[in-house]
């Protein structure tokens, strides 16, 4: 039997504007729910006039972070949840950033402190590319800012992307 995505979108305010995407997405810890992230990011990109290039970077980084939570943090247990919140922040330089915060209740894991966290040399060719271990490199390459915080009951990963004018 095919499991349908069971994500729930939660709003911090109950706006009646159907064209405005919700600021928070809550997913069940199953890979099928990742399909909901694409349409959510598309709606956010349209709302904030994000370029196709930046939209791709956001989708790539979120898919990597979320699939790692599901596969490794929750070890495939489908009864867990993971949330992604999106805000717009103004950096000290005056530029605006679209900031995504991924929170889970998995065991502690700081991807930025992990040995070889994106520091291993990039493969010279596709033939040299080994499965796994490229996610942190991707997030550091595509996100403007990546930060980790251990929570009392989980993990928080922050990914920020510059909104180009």
Image: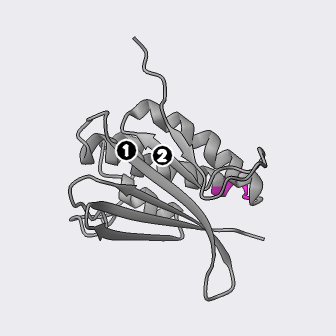
Magenta residues? Answer: 50-54
Q: In this view, does 74 lie to the left or right of 143?
A: left
> Do we see residue 17 in this rendering?
yes
Q: How many labels does the image show?
A: 2
In the visual, does 41 lie left or right of 126? right
- Quarter of the image where the N terminus is located: top left
User: Residue 39, percent across and down?
Assistant: 64, 40
- Residue 72, compared with residue 141, is above or below; it is above
Residue drawn at point x = 23 percent, y = 40 percent: 75
Spot occupied by residue 59 in the image (x, y as percentages of width and height): 56, 48
The structure residue drawn at horizontal position 37% and vertical position 34%, both measured from the top left corner, is 30
Q: Which of 24 and 115 is in front in this view?
A: 24
Which residue lies under the disc numbered 2? 26
The extreme bottom residue here reads: 92
Rendered image coloring scheme: one colour
- Tell me the residue that label 1 is attached to: 81
Quadrant in which residue 23 is drawn: bottom right
Q: Report whether 27 appears left or right of 38.
A: left
The residues tagged by marks 1 and 2 sit, at their Cα atoms, a distance apart of: 7 Å
Percent position of residue 65, x then y: 40, 52
What residue do we see at 60% from left, 65% from top?
87
Tag 1 near tag 2, CB within 8 Å: yes
Mark 1: secondary structure: strand
Tell me which secondary structure the magenta stretch mostly adopts: helix
Q: Which residue lies furthest to the front in this view?
A: 14
Whether residue 140 is visible, yes or no, is no
Look at the picture and state if 2 lies above or below 130.
above
């Amino acid at each position: 039997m095919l499991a349908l995505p069971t994500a729930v979108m939660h709003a911090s305010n109950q706006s009646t504007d159907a064209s405005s995407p919700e600021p928070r997405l809550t997913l069940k810890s199953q890979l099928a729910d990742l399909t909901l992230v694409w349409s959510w990011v598309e709606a956010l990109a349209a709302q904030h006039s994000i370029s196709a290039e930046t939209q791709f970077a956001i989708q790539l980084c979120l898919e990597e972070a979320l699939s790692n939570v599901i596969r490794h943090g929750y070890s495939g247990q489908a009864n867990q949840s993971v949330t992604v919140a999106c805000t717009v922040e103004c950096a000290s330089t005056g530029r605006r950033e679209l900031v995504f915060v991924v929170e889970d209740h998995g065991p502690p894991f700081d991807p930025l402190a992990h040995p070889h966290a994106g520091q291993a040399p990039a493969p010279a060719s596709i033939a040299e590319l080994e499965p796994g271990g490229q996610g942190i490199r991707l997030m550091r390459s595509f996100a403007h800012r990546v930060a980790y915080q251990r929570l009392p009951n989980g993990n928080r990963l922050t990914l920020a992307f510059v909104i180009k004018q």
